Image (cartoon, rainbow, N blue to C red):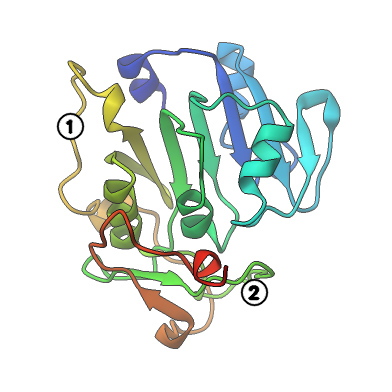
Amino acid sequence: MWAILDSIGVNNAVAVEFGAKDGYKDSNTALLARDRGFKRVMFDTHNENSAIGLYRQFITAETINEQLAAHGVPCDVDVMSIDVDGMDFWIWRALRGFRPRLVQIEINPNFDGHMSYARVYDPKFVWALDKNYGSSALAMVRLGRNLDYQCVGACGHDLFFVARSELCGKDIAELSCVPPLCMLARPAHHGTLDLSKFVEVPEYPVAWCAPWEEAR
């Protein structure tokens, strides 16, 4: 993340994080606050600490924009981290009126590189610590392209995307198709991958309709 921020620069020094745990251990934005003075707005299902900007909220595709607005997150927030162990794909897909400059997002590493799947949308989803959560790397890369983002890095189970509008004149290479499996942490979840619990993600057009939009 440091090298990417050094390349695109910092505008508002604000980071928003979904799935922040306690805001310290296992928080993707903790070092931004400690070492670079970032202000953080964080959400977690189980933890709350308003002193550090951590709020206990179960975030869904239906509520993400409301929560961001309610907590004063700038529409061009410098960093957004999405690690909610399930509906990460759909939460990023649901953003309206917010365009983070750098997105760090978790993927499910149990898929082969050619597979493009996202867990069927369920606003009440709770991960059972098995293989059937989140989305494949290729599905997330395709979503990023649709939202006009470029995949520029991978670490652990996370991919990094930069808004293409931020890349003019910047020396950041795009990862070809999906990150090599050697760049992602090894799968370590129990059970088997059940594709009946996922939807295949095509190279869809901008007008592609998400499940909660279809229900309206």
- Disc 2 marks which amino acid? Ala
- Residue at (63%, 17%) from the top-left corner? 34
Q: Is residue 13 left or right of residue 187?
A: right
Q: Nearer the viewer, residue 184 or 103?
A: 103
User: Considering only vertical position in the picture, is 37 above or below 117?
Assistant: above
Residue 24 in sight here = no
Task: Answer with the quarter of the image where residue 74 lies.
Answer: top right
Q: Quadrant of the C terminus?
A: bottom right
What is the spatial separation of the Cα atoms under label 2 and label 1, in whole angstroms? 36 Å
Q: Could you tell me which secondary element the residue under label 1 belongs to? A: loop
**Looking at the picture, how far across and down is residue 132, in whole percent?**
51, 76
Q: Nearer the viewer, residue 3 or 61?
A: 61
Q: Earlier in the sequence, mark 2 or mark 1?
A: 2
- Residue at (69%, 36%) from the top-left corner? 42
User: Considering only vertical position in the picture, is 72 above or below 188?
Assistant: above
Q: Quadrant of the N terminus?
A: top left
- Disc 1 marks which amino acid? Ala
**Looking at the picture, how far across and down is residue 204, in whole percent?**
26, 62
Q: Could you tell me which secondary element the residue under label 2 belongs to? A: loop
Packing grade of label 2 (10 A; few <14, some 14-19, many >=20) is few
The residue identified by callout 2 is 128
Q: Is residue 65 left or right of residue 80?
A: right
User: Considering only vertical position in the picture, is 184 above or below 102?
Assistant: below
- Residue at (32%, 62%) from the top-left corner? 139
Packing grade of label 1 (10 A; few <14, some 14-19, many >=20) is few
Task: Answer with the quarter of the image where residue 161 lies.
Answer: top left
Numbered circles on residues, count: 2
Q: Nearer the viewer, residue 166 or 104?
A: 166
Q: Are marks 2 and 1 in contact (CB under 8 Å)?
A: no
Which residue appears farthest toward the front when viewing the image?
Answer: 216
User: Considering only vertical position in the picture, is 3 above or below 131?
Assistant: above
Tag of residue 173: 1
